[in-house]
Image (cartoon, rainbow, N blue to C red):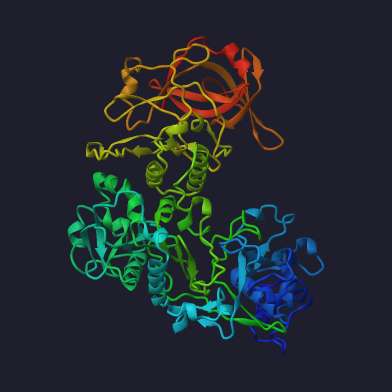
Amino acid sequence: MALNGEGGTWASLKAGVNGESGPSDSEALCNFCKCIFDFGSVGVKFVRRPLSVRDRPVRLILDKSKSCVFCREVAKFYIEWKDGKVDDDLVGIPGQFLGNNWVEYSLHEQKGLANVIEEPSLNRIRVLFQRNAEKYPDSYNDSRPLLQFQYCSQPPLRVSAGGSLCEWKECAPEQAYSGRIRPLLADTRLFLEWKKTCCAKHGDPCNLSSTGTRPTWLRLIDVTERCVKDIVIKDDSSYVALSYVWGKQELGQKLMPLLGNSTENQFRKPMSLTRETVLSTIHDAIEVTKCLGEQYLWVDCLCIKQDDSADQGKFILQMDSIYAYASVTIVAASGGNADAGLPGISESRNNEQEPFKIHGSGVSLLRTLDPVKTTKELTISDDYWYLETSVWCERGWTFQEKLFSRRALIFTEEQVYWECQKATWCEDGFWETMQPPTFSRPCFSKDIRRPWASDNQEAFEKIYVNLVQEYCRRKLTNGSDGLDAFRGILNALEREAGQGFLSALPTSSLSKMLTWWCTERSVKRREEMCPVRLSDGNEGMAGHFCPFSSWSWVGWTSVVELGFISATSDLIFYYLDGERHLRKVEEVSSKSRSRDEEGLNREITLPEIPEIVRSQSVDRNILFFKSTTAKLHVRHEGFDDFKLEKLILSYNNEDVQCSWFHVPDLKQGDKEVCDFVVIGNETDSRTCIMLVIYKKGVAYRRGLASLDATFWKRLQSPNLKLICLG
């Protein structure tokens, strides 16, 4: 029984869902929906009858869509989502429930910011689509959309109505956090009102930009004259910043507008930045900036010379300050390139909102306009971060841009959100109320929203790991940007937490951080070169590059999970500064002694470092330390029952029990004699060793393991060796 044919069952279901046929009572519910929901609990209410997750096959929802108003709304979305391309294999055949895909229903309760037990919660109905795991074992990696339904007053509020724009305090209490009808073309007066309210009522958390240095001047787009200007930044200066994704530089016949030595004069001419000369996202951002009452807009492709290394370096080192001092950041979270535009500005949105009533409950519901695409990690009980699957949220550069923005105007496919330090607002819901309880739903978890302050070393390390893991999940078009796209975050951690860094690793706990591990087999060394950026403003190094450090996570790709093995180490680390002076790394736990517990001298002097190695040291990319070493045989014996690689260490034909934390790039059947260096101690009884490969006197990390400390002492060389780790 195929469902795709125009005259088949699928066509009749589609007609019924769209209202071409149906029951006389359009507000009725099926027995299942009557039992699972107390629809009167939706909205800001105390939940009288909590709901556990309930499953229902998609087939039954489609069958009941002709007679049940709630099934009809779920089926309507399902038809839109599948675009009519649905067959028996997907929805299941009646009576064959093993093949069915299903839907999970739940009533999601969100607590207020005060987290007071006596306060009501904000309750929404959530609908999560699932695929049968037994029949579709790979379906866990598929997109699983999430629908949300919110309470809606009767008649529903509308964005363009005066009360929604200017008279928030006078709104009836029952309308707080209720659904709202937004126009297909955005009413930008609402965005201006959001900004005015934040500036007037939120105080220091939103008005204080940063403790960092304010940029002295910036190139900015004058949105009135539509050209690039040099603007001196004063205490009362104000500008908007754009956070977006470039995508491919050539999109059909349109080219990415790039400021450079050859185009600068042209872009400085009044009215040079028109719809014809800039891509849609930039054009729409210019219009939004004007609607916010601002004159200047910062866009990287037009405010940094893209063909000038010195100019790029100057502004990349200020990226944290540029976004922190912007009055608002426009976030283009819809589309995958710079020509996608800002939905609702030049081009209309698509989704027309239609409230529907639930028979017998006196309740009207409205589907939210939150993006519905979800990731495999999301479950029905999670807090839903509405940007998590956007292309914008996958890109490396945009991470620090959002992190430093004190206020953000976020454009998604169907609606716009406001996020600042004190509030989150949206077009499709009346969230601007000032009456308690107060609810918020930031697009990022609280752990990584302006996380710079830390009370102690342990707290700092937790913050640092969270930031690194979130950044490493993102993608970069150019691998050479691996450190540049994280420099703003490092600047903030240096400034706010008093930390120092070498190749993105904190010097305060360098011994521990060097033992980072990753179980991902796809982890690979960055082949691109890292641009040299000297914080002292030395432009003589502009255009210079050096290899990424193998000893830092930033020198590798696909490092998703970050953990550390070693908590203790007797190693003393050194590096060469920009003037080739030898500097010792001062760690929080370092001891003021030059010899370890075995009496071995670990101090290093400059003459000990070979000249061939010194010449390769650029921008502190090589670490120097003394440690014990050994050569071990490594062989790859395939995979075990858990599909984990079996890498065996041996010495003098004796196999060594070890644990791998970073698997080297060996293939099944490979046998090699490899160099190992002690890098720390996993425990008192286990030694952490790094597999390295030597090139021109410099050792490069290849893998990481731990083994029995007693065994290592049997085979290690009796003397310390100078290690130059690049």
In the picture provided, is 32 more to the left or to the right than 643? right
The answer to which of 233 and 677 lies nearer the viewer is 233
Can you tell which quarter of the image residue 519 is in?
Answer: top right
- Residue at 65%, 67% (x, y): give it: 126
Residue 183 in sight from this viewpoint: no
Residue 408 rendering spot, x and y as whole percentages: 42, 62
Residue 639 rendering spot, x and y as whole percentages: 66, 33
Q: Is residue 311 above or below residue 200?
A: above
In the picture provided, is 656 more to the left or to the right than 483? right
Residue 165 in sight from this viewpoint: yes
In the picture provided, is 667 more to the left or to the right than 527? right
Residue 626 rendering spot, x and y as whole percentages: 45, 18
Quarter of the image with the N terminus in it: bottom right
Furthest residue in direction top, as rendered: 718
- Residue at 72%, 90% (x, y): give it: 24
Furthest residue in direction bottom, as rendered: 24
Can you tell which quarter of the image residue 542 is in?
Answer: top left
Furthest residue in direction right, as rendered: 95
Residue 374 rendering spot, x and y as whole percentages: 58, 60
Quarter of the image with the C terminus in it: top left
